[in-house]
Amino acid sequence: MVLFLLLFMYGSPYLEIIKPCSCSEDHTKVKCIQTEREALLSIKKGLTDPSNRLSSWVGEDCCQWRGIACNNISGHVIKLDLRNPFQSGSYDSSAYKNSCLGGEISSSLINLKYLNYLDISLNDFEGIQIPEFFGMLENLIYLNLSFASFAGEIPRHLGNLSSLTHLDLYADSYTSLMWELNATNLDWLSGLSSLKYLDMGQVKLGHTGADWLQKVNMLPSLLELHLHSCELESLPPSLPFINFTSLFVLDLSQNSFNSSIPQWLSNLTSLAKLDLSSNSFQGTIPNDFVSLINLEYLDLNFNAFVTSQMPSFFGHLCKLKVLDLSGNKFIGNIDGFLGNFSACLNNSLESLDLSYNQLAGKIPNSLGTLESLRYLNLAGNSFWGSIPASIGSLSSLQQLDLSFNQMNGSIPESFGQLSELVELYLQVNSWEGVITEAQLMNLTSLEYVILISNTNQSLVFNVTYNWVPPFRLKQLDLESCLIGPKFPIWLQVQSELTSVILKNTGIWDTIPEEWFSKISSQITYLDLANNQIMGKLPHQIVSPKLGVIDLSHNYFKGPIPLWFTNATHIYLQNNFFSGPIPSNIGDLMPSLEYLDLSENLLNGTIPLSIQKINNLQVLSLRSNQLSGELPRNWNETQGLWVVDISNNNLSGEIPSSMGLLGSLAILMLSNNNLHGEIPSSLQSCSLSSIDLGENHFSGKLPSWIGSNVSFFWMLRLRSNLFSGIIPRQWCNLPVLHILDLAENNLSGDIPDCLDNLTALIYGNSSTDYDILFRFHQYYYMEQTAIVTKGRQLEYGRTLQYVNIIDLSVNNLTGGIPNEITSLVDLGTLNLSMNHLTANIPENIGNLRWLETLDLSHNQLSGSIPGSLSLLTFLAHLNLSYNNLTGRIPSGNQLQT
Ligand SMILES: *[C@@H]1O[C@H](CO)[C@@H](O)[C@H](O)[C@H]1NC(C)=O
Ligand SMILES: *[C@@H]1O[C@H](CO)[C@@H](O)[C@H](O)[C@H]1NC(C)=O
Ligand SMILES: *[C@@H]1O[C@H](CO)[C@@H](O)[C@H](O)[C@H]1NC(C)=O
Ligand SMILES: *[C@@H]1O[C@H](CO)[C@@H](O)[C@H](O)[C@H]1NC(C)=O
Ligand SMILES: *[C@@H]1O[C@H](CO)[C@@H](O)[C@H](O)[C@H]1NC(C)=O
Ligand SMILES: *[C@@H]1O[C@H](CO)[C@@H](O)[C@H](O)[C@H]1NC(C)=O
Ligand SMILES: *[C@@H]1O[C@H](CO)[C@@H](O)[C@H](O)[C@H]1NC(C)=O
Ligand SMILES: *[C@@H]1O[C@H](CO)[C@@H](O)[C@H](O)[C@H]1NC(C)=O
Ligand SMILES: *[C@@H]1O[C@H](CO)[C@@H](O)[C@H](O)[C@H]1NC(C)=O
């Protein structure tokens, strides 16, 4: 006891005598030096420390404070480690920021004269400069200022740190993208003659020109050089002499080098890791690379290397573990490239990425020699044929990606040996052949499978109906492969699926209702579209995580279930669902953005709760048996841009509150029993297509169309009771492609300003509005009935190519205005069954794309213009029931 007290009172000197070992963990033996303690306290004073990380910086013995280490003999502070300990793995920006130190770094730091280790990384100094006085800490060996939000020019004073071996200035920040470290001049680097490790990633070095390399070349001890994303452009092709021949790691990724690879790189024969990815290197990879025999990791992805053959010398780099040549312009086959790897006695390649080049040919059997492969990515090339049987030798393979190629063969039997395989991506190829149980039996690790075939169901899964597989999949995406007709047990037993797509897989079966309840509790994406699946859905579907459900184009029947879900997209179109739409649909699915229930047998009214779904963008209920009126209380907070309720039995008027839907672009209400006028409130919407055909609408054609709203793509008001004239304002519709006013009571002249419909002059090529229309069509396919060539046809995908003016079956009078002959892109012009007089315009032959011309049942007179014979596409011509005289012109289509 006495001895212990003595030890305690007199401290370390005794301990050192009694226990001369260097028990460095025993801090009682050294005592901190008073001046250094004060220096530390004034450093603490300058810093902000919201999470109180420096709370241990109290009391006498500063050597025991957190982050401090002292020399055991002299007691001088030698290490200051203020690195933020926050684990950014569970990344939470506010928690991270809270654990950052910030503020000011006191110049008292220079009183720590014996400091050899300084780490202040991962803090947030909010754009202050790196203090110049760091250059006075001349004993520093280790300096880490990375991820600390320093900004501005790196002070040249750092060049005085001649003992420094490790310098990390990586200039990223987890708190702000605002700060930028730069260096216009690297002269100071040459002072760091002991440097072994240098990281200046993200430091903007663009202004140093080619100088950066000369300065780095003054560092003969350098082992690692990291210059990721430094805005470097210049990499000199030659160096008279290389100082850093021991370089072990070189990272020049994500700069702007666009030269060829300099010859001298091949002299760095100690290199184990070389990363030149994400630059614009050109030309070929020099053959001299064969001298880099120590390379284990080579990343050249995202450059512009071109070569007629894959460089085959890689096969001689027998230590290579990781090779990434993806995203370049390599062409040719890979036979020679792979062949050479077999020369290595112990092939160690674990990861090979050749994706997104222009490689072609069959995948050679020599693939099987890469027995250590864990990751193989050949996606985005033009490989064809079958997967070689030798794939079975890759017994460590965990991830295989052959997606987006032209594979048109089969998947070999030996595939079944890949028992380590976790991820399999085979989508967008033209697979053929049969997949058997034997091929799947040993794939015990499989979790992610994507297999999309271009050829319709020519890859067949031939598996016993009640086979239970050894794998538990998380994601399954099979499209256009044949799995059916039965819904197999091997799918039903998958209990860990979070995403399932079985599209066009030939399933012609009833899926057990329990499967839906079982699978839906964890599933986020469920797509069974384009099968012939029968049966009902469970009465309720409770599925909080479900985001997208697509059961479209099947034979589902029964009522639409009550969905308890936050789904955003529901596609149930083209089934046999019947009964009413659940009235609380808007309450149960408040997150809905896309609801498509079209082409079913739904009846009853449109639930009012739909008006509560604020995120709803597309609402399609077309082709059902819905009755009653349109909901009245549309809300300006709703973002609907498509409302399609065509082909139902709706009655009543269009409520003027629809004008509150400011984003509404597509309004399709054709073929109902609606009446009344077009509400003028609709001019507040962003309408581009409106189809009110086949209803009982009446009143005048509104003149706000063309004056307040001009960007209509389609105006279809066919078969209603509209009366009055065609307003001149309607000429001012520069993107209009479809104008169908047929079968109304319109009177007056055809406006002589139709040559202002410029989309019918210049075609549907490239105006912003045509691009917008195609964009709309991509998300929601507009469909409508078009009368052309004497027949009425439903247009969907091809609607974008339709150019039509149909004013037939009205009471229009006067002549056919000459201006109409400017609309050279018109495909159909139908003015029949009016009271038009005078001549057919002489230049009618200007309408060179015209397929249908119907002027029948009018009072036209004069002769048939000879220019008609210029119309080489004309397929349907009706001039009957007029007062035309003279010769029928001849030539071209008129002859046939
Ligand atoms: C370097 O950063 C400082 C401070 O942000 C700035 O004033 C200076 O213009 C930058 N220099 C270059 C060459 O970008
Ligand atoms: C190589 O490094 C030494 C020491 O820094 C330096 O004196 C010499 O100039 C360097 N050589 C070249 C070619 O940069
Ligand atoms: C690179 O190596 C070659 C052959 O060993 C040698 O002739 C050349 O001088 C070296 N280049 C440099 C820059 O050291
Ligand atoms: C699956 O594994 C068993 C046992 O290891 C083996 O006998 C069989 O050949 C393997 N099947 C395939 C297709 O590789
Ligand atoms: C499926 O397998 C069965 C039994 O092995 C066989 O009789 C049948 O021909 C196979 N079908 C196809 C399409 O390969
Ligand atoms: C929808 O999401 C909210 C919040 O994310 C959650 O509270 C609610 O339970 C979810 N709804 C359903 C039906 O799971
Ligand atoms: C809906 O259709 C069903 C038969 O499919 C019928 O029994 C029911 O009365 C209809 N409801 C309405 C509102 O028309
Ligand atoms: C529109 O919706 C908002 C939010 O749901 C609601 O507060 C507001 O009362 C609604 N307005 C009308 C006119 O229904
Ligand atoms: C036709 O277009 C011209 C030029 O855009 C415009 O000045 C004129 O007012 C338009 N005419 C009609 C009737 O819209």
Image (cartoon, rainbow, N blue to C red):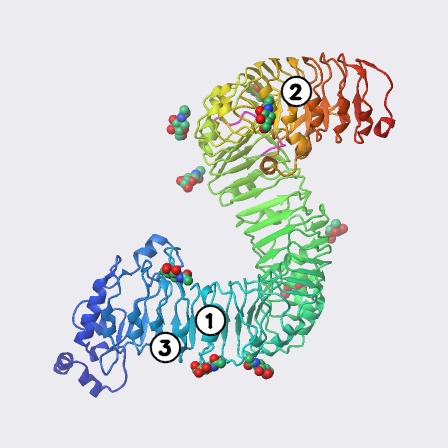
**Type of amino acid at the residue the image marks with label 2:** Asp
Taking 273 as reference, is 176 left or right? left
Label 2: few (<14), some or many (≥20) within 10 Å? some
Measured as percent of width and height from the top left, residue 7 is found at: 15, 81
Compare residues 550 and 264 and report the one nearer the observer.
Answer: 264
Prevailing SS of the magenta stretch? loop
Q: Against 475, is 692 above or below?
A: above
Compare residues 149 and 515 and report the one nearer the observer.
Answer: 149
Instruction: For the C terminus, give its image quadrant.
Output: top right
Q: Earlier in the sequence, mark 3 or mark 1?
A: 3
Label 3: few (<14), some or many (≥20) within 10 Å? many
Residue 164 got which mark?
3
Q: Against 817, is 492 above or below?
A: below
**Type of amino acid at the residue the image marks with label 3:** Leu
Q: Residue at x 73, y 58 (%)?
A: 385
Q: Earlier in the sequence, mark 2 or mark 1?
A: 1
573 is within the stretch colored magenta: yes
Residue 212 got which mark?
1
Compare residues 623 and 438 and report the one nearer the observer.
Answer: 623
> Which residue corresponds to mark 2?
752
Separation of marks 3 and 1 at Cα, in angstroms:
19 Å
Q: Quadrant of residue 354?
A: bottom right
Q: Which residues are magenta?
A: 572-583
